[in-house]
Amino acid sequence: MSDHTKTDLVTLSRHVLADQQAHPGASGDLTLLLVSIQLGCKFVATCVRKAGIVNLTGLAGETNVQGEDQKKLDVLANEIFVNSLRSSGKVAIMVSEEDEDMIVVSDADRDGERARYAGRLLNPLDGVVQHRGRRFDWHDFRHLQACSARFPRARTADVASAPRSSRRTPDLCMAPRGKLIYSINEGNSVYWDDACVEYFGALQDRTVEGKPAPYGARYVGSMVADVHRTILYGGIFAYPADKKSKSGKLRVLYECFPMAFIVENAGGRATTGTKRILDLEPTKLHERSGIFLGSADDVAELEAVYAKHATAG
Ligand code: P6P
């Protein structure tokens, strides 16, 4: 039976509730949190679809902490997710690409000590991620950073054309080498370091048993979409640090960490080229890093090229 005629739909809420019921004694906090994220995704997806009709496209006339021109939809999506996470009563603090400082949820909005989650809003149009912290001193970033590498939950949601969401689950599994796909903005190749030039140049000249086996290029320009495809089909996604973006472009806390967490738990790898992403220790909320992630064998080959260049000095 094709999907559109199915009448017994397993919605996200139904799936999450079944998961909770399968764990007797579960508090139900994560269920409430995921349902609040789902609400945000549905609301933003509706706004994206009608943007052209209700004048929601274009610039908001402000710049965010990154110095980027905020789009009306960026500002709206950010407010939608902040409000939906706050209303869950389960989030203590939030960090958003669109806000310079941490958003500390007031006592009135928090469900007392039960508010154990730190919700991080990636570029709200790209996705939302969260993790459960052990204990928060709301005003101490170090607790947030200390918890970052211990993601019991991380999820991304792509609310563009076909809203879809993924989260770290035990049955997400990436083959050591999937489809021959590389995903990087080649417009920046003039800025790449020698190791990056060598690795990606070799992908197009690759042969297997004497027969040409070049990699194909796929690049959306949205990390959530590009990583989602890499998890589904394999290959390697990259946004390296280079001569133009010396610390890379993607933010450690709410882009690199959650994506690395999901990919590693699916059997893949995530690295700066020389260091495992989840071993990074950021000291600022919006700190950036270069990142390569994807199928384990592909990323290991990239790391070998970086190691060779490091040895050669
Ligand atoms: P570029 C989107 O603006 C974003 O922050 C990521 O989602 C994406 O991977 C990257 O920037 C794309 O950057 O320079 O290739 O347009």
Image (spheres, rainbow, N blue to C red):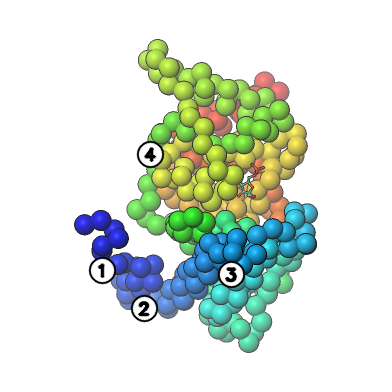
User: Which label's residue is closer to the chain start, 3 or 4?
Assistant: 3
* Residue at the spot of label 3: 81
Horizontal and vertical percent for residue 234? 43, 39
* Residue at the spot of label 1: 8
> Mark 1, mark 2: which one is toward the viewer?
1
Which quadrant does the N terminus fall into?
bottom left
In this view, the residue in front, 296 or 120, is 120
* Residue at the spot of label 4: 175
| Corner quadrant of residue 220 | top right
| Corner quadrant of residue 105 | bottom right
- SS at mark 1 in the image: loop
User: Which label's residue is closer to the chain start, 1 or 3?
Assistant: 1
Q: CA distance from mark 1 to mark 3?
A: 29 Å
Q: Which mark is residue 25?
A: 2
Horizontal and vertical percent for residue 271? 57, 41
Q: Are marks 3 and 2 in contact (CB under 8 Å)?
A: no
Q: CA distance from mark 3 to mark 2?
A: 28 Å
- SS at mark 4 in the image: loop
